[in-house]
Amino acid sequence: MSERIEQRAPGSEGEEDPIVPSSSPVPESTPRRAPSSRRGESVFRFLASGSGVLVVAAIALIGLFLLIQAVPSLMANNANFFTSPEFSTGDANNLSFGIRDLFLVTVFSSVFALVLAMPVALGVALFLTNYAPKQLSRPFAYVVDLLAAVPSIIYGLWGILVLAPAIEPIARWLNTNLGWIFLFRTGNLPVLSGTIFTGGVVLAVMILPIITAVSREVFAQTPRFQIEAAKALGATRWEVIRMATLPYGRSGYIAGSMLGLGRALGETIAVLIVIRASTSPMTFSLFDGGYTFASLIASAASEFSQPLPTGAYISAGLVLFVLTFVVNALARVIAGGKVNG
Amino acid sequence: MAKRIDLKDVDIYYGAFHAVQNVNLTVIPRSVTAFIGPSGCGKSTVLRTLNRMHEEIAGARVEGEILLDGENIYDRGTDAVAVRRTIGMVFQMPNPFPTMSVRDNVVAGLKLQGVRDKKKLDEVCEASLRGANLWKEVKDRLDKPGGGLSGGQQQRLCIARAIAVQPDVLLMDEPCSALDPISTLAIEDLIADLKKEYTIVIVTHNMQQAARVSDQTGFFNLEATGKPGHLVEIDDTEKIFSNPTQQATEDYISGRFG
C-alpha cells in the first residue's frame, strides 16, 4: 500500500492539474498552437504504438516460423516426440526423435545452476546494498556486472579446462558419500567431469550477474521509512534486512532469479563445450551427460541441408522457446510489474 | 519506567554544517514536551538525537551531553541499537511493516529483544493495542497484514508497536501530519493517556496541537537559512502561549511569521 503512495507522490498528476484550469480562461493561445502540437502528438503516438506492435509481431512471427517449420517433421516422426530419449535424424525418410533427454538435461543443469546462484546472488546483493562502504560498493557492483560481459565461449573454455578438473574431487566425494541420493549416483558417463554438475556450476557463474543486478536494484529501493521503523525498534543491521529489506525485495529477487533461469535454459555454447555427449539415456543424475535443447541444435547446425531433419531440430527449438517464454512470463507475474530487467 | 531527559550544551553537526546550536533543556518523567518552530529550525533533528536516529545520516555528530536518568546515551561504551530498544519512536509517515500481520507488527520489538514465549507475546499484543486504542478495531484481524489498515489505524498500530517494549521515553515526530482530523483527535487523546506512564517528546507543526497535548513547549528558531537552529525558549505550555518572554516566540505563536 504505502509503496504505491510514495511512487505516485512525485508523479506528474499533481503538477499538471493546476495548469489546466489556468490555461483554459485564456482561449487565444490554444487554437494557434493546436495544429502543430496535435500533429506532433499523432506522429509520436504512431511511432510509439508502431514500435510496440512491431515487437509483439516479431515474437509472434518467430513462434509462427518455428511452428510452420516443425509441423512436417513432427508428422513424419516415428518416435514419441515427448517421451523418446533418442534423437536420430540421419535418415530423412526415417526420422525418430524425442525431447525427453533434451528437456531433462536442460532443466537439470539450469535448475542446479539456479540453486547454486540464488544464495550467492542474495549475499552479494545484500552486501552491496547494506554492508559495503559506498566507495567499495560501486566498483564491486561493476565487477559483478562485468561477469555478464564475458563471452560465453570463454566460460565454456574456462569450464572445461579449469573448472572441470578443479571440481572433480568434489563430484567424486558427493558420488562416493551421497551416491544413494539419485542426484549424485553414477550417471551415464564413464567419468565425473564434463557432466551436468560441471555445466551447472558454469551456468551458475553466468547467471549470477543478472540475479545480483536485479536484486541489488530492488533492495536499494527499500523505502527509507521502512528501514527507520526497524532501526527505531533497535534492530541490528541484519535484523533491518530481515524486517524491511527482504520482505520488500523478495518478489524482485525471485523475478531476477527467474530471468537468470531463462538465461540458463537458453545458454548454448558454454554448455555445448562443457557437458559431454552421452550415448545412453539420462538417468536423473547430476553426473549424467547429454545435450540441452540449445546445445543439440548448435551442434547440428552445420548439417541443416534437408528440410525434414532440420524441422526436427526446429521443433526442439520451439519447445525451448515456449519454456523460456513461460519462465519469463512467470518472472513478470511474480514481480508484479516492479522490475524491468 | 518513565525516565528523565537532560540536554546539556548540545550542538549537532552534519559534516561541516552546524545544524543546531547550544540546546539546554530538561524533560521530566510522565509529561509531554512539544517542540515547535518553523521548518529547518532543527526541532526534528534534536528529537532524533534523543534515540540516536540522526546517526543514520552520514557525517552526523553530537557534542554536549544527552542524559537519560543521568546516563549519557552517547557514552563510548553505549551502543545505538541498545539505546533505541529503550526509546520508542513514532514517525510522521505511518510505517508499519506492510507484509507483517498486525500481531507481528506490535510484538516486533519484543521479538528483537528475544522474547519467544507465545503467551507472553499475545498478552503484550493485546495490552499494547488496547493502550493505543486500536484493540476493538483490529481484534478480529490480528493475522491480516498491517499494511491493510487505514492511515489513522496504521499510526496507532505504530504507537502500539512503540509502547509494546515499555520504553523509557516515547518520541513522536509530527505523528499527525499525515492524518485526517478525526484520526488526529484519536492520537491526541491517546497521548493524554500515555503520559500517565511514559515520558513523551513530540515535534509538531501544529501550534494548536502543541497547546492541546503538551505540558511544556520548546520553541526553536533559526536566524537565517544556513545558520544553525537554536532553542529560543522552553517553558510551561500555558506560559509560552499566553505570555512568552521572547519577542520571537510571541511573533511565531501569534502568526506574525513562520
Image (cartoon, rainbow, N blue to C red):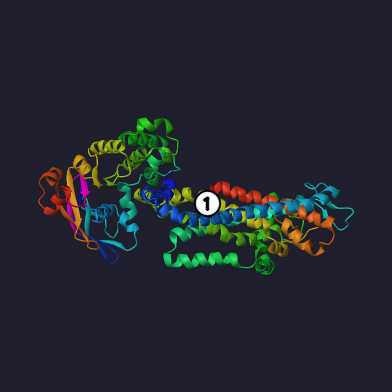
Q: Position of residue A101 (x, y in %)?
A: 76, 52
Q: Position of residue A300 (x, y in %)?
A: 79, 61
Q: Position of residue A172 (x, y in %)?
A: 68, 60
Going by the numbered disc 1, the residue's amino acid type is: Gly
Q: Quadrant of residue A260?
A: bottom right
Circle 1: is it few (<14), some (14-19), or many (20+) Cα within 10 Å? many
Camera-nearest residue between B43 and A195: B43
The chain letter for the residue carrying disc 1 is A
* As drawn, A173 above or below A226: below
Q: Quadrant of residue A271?
A: bottom right
Camera-nearest residue between A19 and A297: A19
Residue beneath the point at 69% across and 56% down: A175
Q: Position of residue B62 (x, y in %)?
A: 26, 60
Give the magenta range: B21-37
Indicate yes or no whether the magenta region holds residue B27: yes
Q: Is residue B105 left or right of residue B72?
A: right
Q: Residue furthest right?
A: A93
Q: Quadrant of residue B210?
A: top left
Q: Is residue B248 visible?
A: yes
* As drawn, B17 above or below B92: below
Tally of numbered discs: 1
Q: Is residue B41 left or right of residue B59?
A: left
Indicate yes or no whether the magenta region holds residue A124: no
Quadrant (top left/top right/bottom left/bottom right) for the N terminus of chain A: top left
Secondary structure at numbered mark 1 = helix
Q: Is residue A183 visible?
A: no
Camera-nearest residue between B135 and B181: B181
Q: Is residue A117 left or right of residue A249?
A: right
Q: Which residue is mark 1?
A: A252
Q: Give the overall secondary structure of the magenta segment.
A: strand
